[in-house]
Image (cartoon, helix red, strand yellow):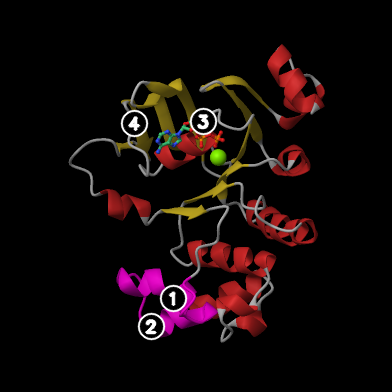
């Protein structure tokens, strides 16, 4: 049983001007955990997720990645980010590159893999996300669900220690949500550490090891899926789940 803390969030606060978005959040992400983040729109879920790789800089507080304080000014944040994969609502594939080249780009540019290794990795990952036949296709020829599966493969090509997902299925047509969630389930079962902001309550219930309910910039309630979905304590969580 793995019990190693990967990320420590220590009294994290974030404000945009005088708009306070995150108010004193502390929690840890352990290796192999799948943490689902749920909560109403505008409560700070994306800001929290983006803080984990410093796409947003904390106003105060610290983020420790394997014990190293990444908010410290001496840290090479780009090196740190190589270990943190991120998948957004919008897939952001490069339209002028084939699918294989999209996946090869980061590891080759950052000198992590040779072109040959990166091509082999891309083909292996495409097989894993069920798109082995699309390596030479262009992004425009793919459906939204297929593009998001490529975006997941692209993030995995850097062999990250943790994968962050920000509502990866929210921009998809309903009939494509299932194929993306299935890839994420497979990834979770492979032991990947994942932090997933999602509106897919069935995914959070079935796949997450822990659920964080965000509300008004704080973690209002936190627990195992069964606690959160079957025995919610706070009135706000109860009314959120009724929607
Ligand atoms: P969620 O993902 O839960 O919907 P967000 O983290 O995106 O919430 O946003 C939380 C609040 O922070 C919102 O009120 C949003 O308008 C505000 N916000 C997010 N990013 C910025 C930014 N770059 N500048 C100013 N305000 C922002
Ligand atoms: Mg968001």
CA distance separating discs 3 and 4: 13 Å
Residue 34, quarter of picture? top right
Asked if marks 3 and 2 touch (Cβ < 8 Å), the reply is no
Q: Are marks 2 and 1 in contact (CB under 8 Å)?
A: yes
Nearest to N terminus: mark 3 or mark 4: 3
What distance separates the C-alpha of mark 2 from that of mark 1? 7 Å
State the residue in front, 87 or 173.
Answer: 173
Mark closest to the chain's N terminus, 3 or 2? 3
Binning the other alpha carbons within 10 Å of mark 4 as few (below 14), some (14 to 19) or many (20 upward) gives: many
| Main secondary structure type of the part rendered in magenta | helix
Q: Which residues lie in the magenta part?
A: 94-120
Question: Which residue in the protein does label 4 denote?
Answer: 58
Q: Is residue 124 visible?
A: yes
Residue with the mark numbered 2: 115
- Sequence-wise, the earlier of marks 2 and 1 is 1
Please name the residue that numbered disc 1 is placed on.
104
The residue drawn where x is 48% and y is 39% is 49
Corner quadrant of residue 212: top right
Task: Give me the C-alpha separation between circle 1 and circle 4.
Answer: 32 Å
What SS does tag 2 mark?
A: helix
Which residue bears the numbered disc 3? 44
Q: Residue furthest front?
A: 18
Count neighbours of disc 1 (C-alpha within 10 A) and say few if under 14, some if 14 to 19, many if 20 or more. Answer: many
Q: For the point 72% across and 44% down, which residue is it?
A: 207
Please provide percent x and percent y for residue 175: 80, 60
């Amino acid at each position: 049983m793995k019990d190693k803390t990967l990320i420590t969030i220590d009294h994290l606060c974030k404000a945009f001007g005088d708009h306070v978005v995150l108010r004193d959040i502390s929690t840890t992400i352990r290796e192999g955990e799948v943490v689902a983040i749920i909560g109403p729109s505008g409560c700070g879920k994306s800001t929290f997720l983006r803080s984990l790789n410093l796409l947003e800089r904390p106003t105060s507080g610290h983020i420790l990645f394997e014990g190293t304080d990444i908010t410290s000014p001496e840290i090479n944040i780009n090196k740190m980010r190589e270990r943190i994969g991120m998948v957004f609502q919008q897939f952001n594939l490069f339209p002028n590159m084939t699918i294989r080249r999209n996946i090869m780009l980061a590891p080759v540019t950052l000198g992590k893999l040779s072109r040959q290794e990166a091509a082999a990795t891309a083909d292996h990952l495409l097989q894993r996300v069920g798109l082995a036949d699309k390596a030479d296709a262009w992004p425009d020829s793919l459906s939204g669900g297929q593009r998001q599966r490529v975006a997941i493969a692209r993030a995995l090509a850097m062999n990250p220690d943790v994968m962050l997902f920000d509502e990866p299925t929210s921009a998809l047509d309903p009939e494509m949500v299932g194929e993306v969630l299935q890839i994420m389930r497979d990834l979770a079962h492979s032991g990947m550490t994942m932090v997933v902001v999602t509106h897919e309550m069935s995914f959070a219930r079935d796949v997450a090891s822990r659920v964080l309910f965000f509300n008004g910039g704080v973690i209002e309630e936190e627990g195992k899926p069964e606690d959160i979905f079957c025995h919610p304590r706070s009135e706000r969580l109860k009314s959120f789940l009724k929607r």
